[in-house]
Structure formats: C-alpha cells, structure tokens
Image (cartoon, grey):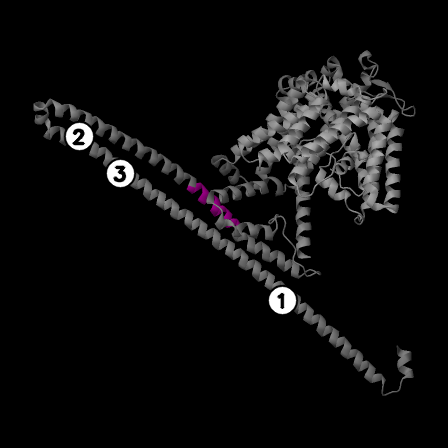
Amino acid sequence: MANLVCHLPSWLAPQDQLKQLQEILGSLSLQEEKSRASQHRLDQRVNSEAQRSSSLITQLQAMVAEREAKVQQLEQEIGQLSMQYRQNKGMDKGSSGTEDHSAYTKFLEDPIQTKSLASAGDHVGRLGSSRVEESNSKLLESEKKLQEERQRTVVLEQHLEKMRLEPGRTSVSQKAASRSKTGLPTSNTRHNPNGSERKDSSFTQLSNVPMESQMEELTTSAIEAMGIRTTLPTAELGLYSLVLSGALAYAGRGLLEASQDGAHRKAFRESVRPGWEYIGRKMDVADFEWVMWFTSFRNVIVFALSGHVLFAKLCTMVAPQLRSWMYAVYGALAVLGTMGPWYLLLLFGHCVSLYVASLLGQPWLCLGLGLVSLASFKLDPLISWQSGFVTGTFDLQEVLFHGGSGFTVLRCTSFALESCAHPDRRYSLADLLKYNFYLPFFFFGPIMTFDRFHAQMSQVEPVRQEGELWRIRAQAGLSVVTIIAVDIFFHFFYILTIPSDLKFANRLPDSALAGLAYSNLVYDWVKAAVLFGVVNTVARLDHLDPPQPPKCITALYVFAETHFDRGINDWLCKYVYDHIGGEHSEVIPELGATVATFAITTLWLGPCDIVYLWSFLNCFGLNFELWVQKLAEWGPLAQIEASLSEQMSRRVRALFGAMNFWAIIMYNLVSLNSLEFTELVARRLLLTGFPQTTLAVLFVTYCGVQLVKERERTMALEEDQKQDKEKLE
C-alpha cells in the first residue's frame, strides 16, 4: 500500500486516506447501530419476560384470594349449619313438650284424636331426627371441604413464592447473556427446566381449568421436577459410583470363581464345551440361538443381508421408484429358498385373509381375525398342521417358523387396522406384500407399524441427514465388537449354565447369586440389542427409521418402561394398551388395558404355565405402580412429600425404585430361567440372608438407581437446552 501511495500524485494520497477513514467510520457507525438494535430487542425481551412473570404472579395472587374467600365462605356455612343444628334440636324438644301439655285433656276424651296425634308425633320425631342427621352430614362434609381448601391454599402459596423468585432468576440469566459474545439469552435450565414458553402457555390456561385440576397439575409437576430435575452433591454421587463399582467387582469375582470350580462338573458337560483355542478355556454354549446365529448360520445371515444391501443399492441407482418392489421380491425369494414354497403360500393365505377383512372397514373384525391367525400358530392342533408346510429340516427351523409366521400376523393386523383408520387412502394387497416380505424385519423383527413403514418407503428420492452414514458404520462396528465381547465373556462366566444346576447355585455366596440373577437379564438385553442392531443397520441403509433397541435393563426401575422388543411394545401400545387405557391415569381403565395387553402377549409368547405366571406378575407390577402413584397423590402424602426438600424427595423415590428394580428382575427370571431358580434367589436374598444381605443388595441397587436418575437428569437438561436453542433460532 505504501508503494502504491508513492506512485500516486501528492494531492491524491490524502484524499484516499480520507476516503478510507470515512469508510471505517461508516462501518463503525453501522456496527454501533446494529448493537443498539440488538440491545433494544434484548431490553424488550427482558421487559416482556418481566411483564409475563408479573402477570403470572397477579393470577396466582387472585387465585389465592379466591381460595381464601371460599374458605371464609365455608367457615360461615359451617357456623350457620351449627346454629341450625342447635335450633332444630331445641325446637324438637320445645314443640313436643308444649303440644303434649296443651292437648293432653283432649286426648283423654277423644281416642281417635289420640291415635292420630300419636302417629303425627311419630312423624314429627322422624322428621326431626332426619333433619338432625342431614345437618350432621352437611357439617362433616363442609369441614372436609374446608380442610381440602386449606391444603390447596397452602400449595398455591408455596407455588406463588416460587414464582416470585422466577423474575429475579430470569433477569440474572438475561444479564449474563447480554454480557456474552453471542448476545443471545441463555436459559437457566436448572430453575426452569421446562422452558419459559411451555410454562407460560400452561399458566395462561389456568382460568379455563377447574381448580382441582390446577392443583393436581401443579403438585404433579412439582413432584416430577423433584424426582427428575433435582441434582445431588458431587461427593454423594461419587460415593454411589464407588459402592456400585465395588459391588459389581465383588459379585463378578464370585461368579468367576464359581465358573472355574464348575467347569468340569458332569452337569455342565452338555452346555460347557471347548471354546476358542487361543483363549484355552471352555465356553458356555447353553443359548443355542446365539450359537447358531454366529456359528452355523453366520455365513447364511451375512450372505442374505449382503445380497439385500447390494440389490437395494443397484435398484436405488437405476430405478429408485421400484425399490419397494425389489425389497419384496428379494424377501419372498429368501423365504422361498429357506422355508420352501408351501410355507410361502401359507403366509400368503394369511395375508389375503386379513386384507379381505380390511376391506370391510371394521377394526374389531380385523383385530379378532388377527388374534385367531396368531392363535393358529401357537396352539395345537393347528400349529402342528401348519408346521408341516415347511420343507426340509435344519437347526433353526422351528425358530424361523415361529418368528416368520408370528411377525407376519402382526404386520398384517397392523395393515388391516391402519386401513380401517384411513379409509380414504385405499391401500392395496401389493402394499401389504411389500410391507410383510421386507427381509431384514421378516423373521426376527423388529416390527414397524404399517403407517410408518409405508410413509418412509414411499419416498422416491430419500435424503440422508448429515453424519448419518457415519452413525450407521458406528452402529455396525459396535454390533461386531459386542458379539466378540459376549463370546469372550462366555469363556470366563458360565451365567447361563449355572442356574440349571440348583445344587451348585445354592452353594454360591449371596453376592454372587444376586449378580448371577442380574447378569442373566443383562445378557438377554444384550442379545436383543445385538439382533436389533444388526437388523437396524441394514434398515437404516434402506433409508428407514426402525424401532430402537430395548432400553438397558440396568436403567429399568419402572414397569412401564420394561420391554425387550420395542417394536412389539409400540404395536401393543398403539392398537391395544393406549386404545383401552386412554391417558393411563384411571385405575379401572388401566386395569382393563393391562389385562388385554398381557393376554395378547401371552398368546404371542405361547400359552403355558410359565408364561401365565410371567404375564400375571408383570401385569400386577404395572398396575401396582399406578396404585402407588395414586396413593402418593393423595392429600396427606402429597403434603408430606411437598414438605421435603427436592434432594430428599429424590432419595425417597430412588429407594422405591430400588425395590421396584428387583421386582422387575424376579418377575422376568421366571421366564428367562426357571421358577425353581427364581425361588432360590428370592429365598436367599429375602429370607435366609435377611437382614444383612437384603439391606446390602437394596443399598447397592439404590446407588445404581441414583446414578441412572442422574443420567436421566443430564439428558433432560440437554434436551431442554436443545429446545431452547431451537426456539431462539
């Protein structure tokens, strides 16, 4: 620049410098105007938030004043009823005395009048006593209402005090935001976890909601915030982590020693066999499905899924509008080559029958026919007759037969019910066949409801989100690593074989026995997660959004979230559980919904004594949770919890969650292992080991539940921050 100025005439250089200075000043003034405008918008937002908070406080003050006025009115009514009660009592006595004295001589002279007056006296006595009883009942009812109104007033005052603190917190966060580089207001998620807009929208509707509903909503939201959004001291959480890690290590050491001692037992010979040579240990092969999937049929599964991915890619490149047809044809050919032509025709017949039922537009008929079709694959003699349609014999024949037929019925039922729900869309039989014979979901699920599958498959040119391919590769790699880790684990821990030998299991220490029960449920979850992970990887390559793997058993302390197949769980919730139970807040509809849901689940699993017991226990657990929730919302108990600090409320809820966690484990051990092993675990942990073992296991579980709650709290705060960021953008 200096060289350029030197070559210019002497009278041009100052002018250029002056222009540059003017441009710099202009840009600075423009930036200043932008900053003023942003500051003005920020001030307006602060004022609007302050006005909104003040309006909320005014509404709550009006509500409190209204409640106090109602309380005074009830007190006056009680006083009037008390006076009326005393007056009625005195009038009854006085009237009866005067009437008897004035008419006494006439009664002696006229026996007819004496008889009529006696009946009239009886009528007056009955009338007086009825009035007294009515006054007593009104008095008791008014006193009860007065107590309820006082309790509601107390809760409203507590919430009013909390709302009075919100403007200060909001202004502090907004001041901090104004000093930040971005100039955007940050959200104080700890004090306002649900976001300001949701809170404001809920309070603007308070005038349209009855006071009872308002109080129940406020109490429930406050208790929910104490149970989920409350944090604990870091030192306390560190102690919980240390206790849980030590307990798991101690129980794992006991299981490792037990596996080493029992490796050469005669009872273990069938299920503990030589494993990998370079490990030099025997391997637990008690789960034949896992062994077949990843040994005998590993190459077949890889070949079939790889062919599906290859043909799908070619079809997407050449004719993307035909990719749904390609999926159906490839899936039908795979079923034909695996199970034979007669099995394919059998399933085609079930598809046609449910398609015809869907044309009638009656949901009850479609659901009933679907349950009949499902029962034909679960009950004799129809199951024996239909299993004869499979040609050839191989190890996984029974598993593939039940999986393919069962999921086919559920998919066809979903198609029929969605057709009844949307008669204007007119789905065809071809749509049903495309839906049913999608190979990755055919034999083992997970099941997608027809509306979701059809909407995603109908996209001619689907677009992947940013980073989706990386996530798919990560999911595939995680599935491979998990399979290898499980195989290595089975070389050291014989958790599937030990429960079959009750004498050997009875000699285990209490800690090892508790760890054995827990590890069996964890393995069942890992097995389902690996299966769905492999299938979902292929489905996501096909631009589908399949159901996610089940929630880890370690994070389950609520029966409402307990499921090992998220697809079947979604199917049952959509077509049975939510349809009957509604909002799941009433006891009787919830009982009917759970009974119907577990009845269908029993049919899906195959009716037998163990399945009956498992269904009953889990149905009871799900309803018992609602009963306890209703009891906790009862006035006195709700007041007790409201009087506790947020941290103490979380600790109390975690204690109940720990007991619920072991109820979930015990109820599901019945179906995963045996009733005898479940009885052994229950007797050792609850009776023989009481109180030392019982309290120790409960405390360790309590620590785990607290860590799970902390994880849920962190995820909830992250979700709130994400939503607040989206609202600001």
**Would residue 155 be counted in the magenta stretch?**
yes
Q: Earlier in the sequence, mark 2 or mark 1?
A: 1
Q: Earlier in the sequence, mark 2 or mark 3?
A: 3
Of the 4 image quadrants, the one containing the C terminus is: bottom right
Q: Along the horizontal axis of the image, is 218 left or right of 301?
A: left
The one nearer the camera, 374 or 520, is 374
Report x, y in % for residue 414. Answer: 69, 34
Q: Do the residues bearing badges 3 and 1 touch, measured as CB atoms within 8 Å?
A: no
Report x, y in % for residue 422. Answer: 66, 41
Report x, y in % for residue 420. Answer: 65, 37
Tell me which corner region of the image, top left, top right, bottom left or bottom right, holds residue 349.
top right
**Would residue 689 be counted in the magenta stretch?**
no
Gap between marks 2 and 1, in whole Å? Answer: 83 Å
Magenta highlight range:
149-162
Q: Along the horizontal axis of the image, is 128 left or right of 558?
A: left
Report x, y in % for residue 308. Answer: 86, 37
Residue receiving disc 2: 96
Nearer mark to the viewer, of 2 and 3? 2
Indicate whether 267 appears above or below 36: above
10 Å neighbourhood of mark 3: few (<14), some, or many (≥20)? some
10 Å neighbourhood of mark 1: few (<14), some, or many (≥20)? few
Q: Earlier in the sequence, mark 3 or mark 1?
A: 1
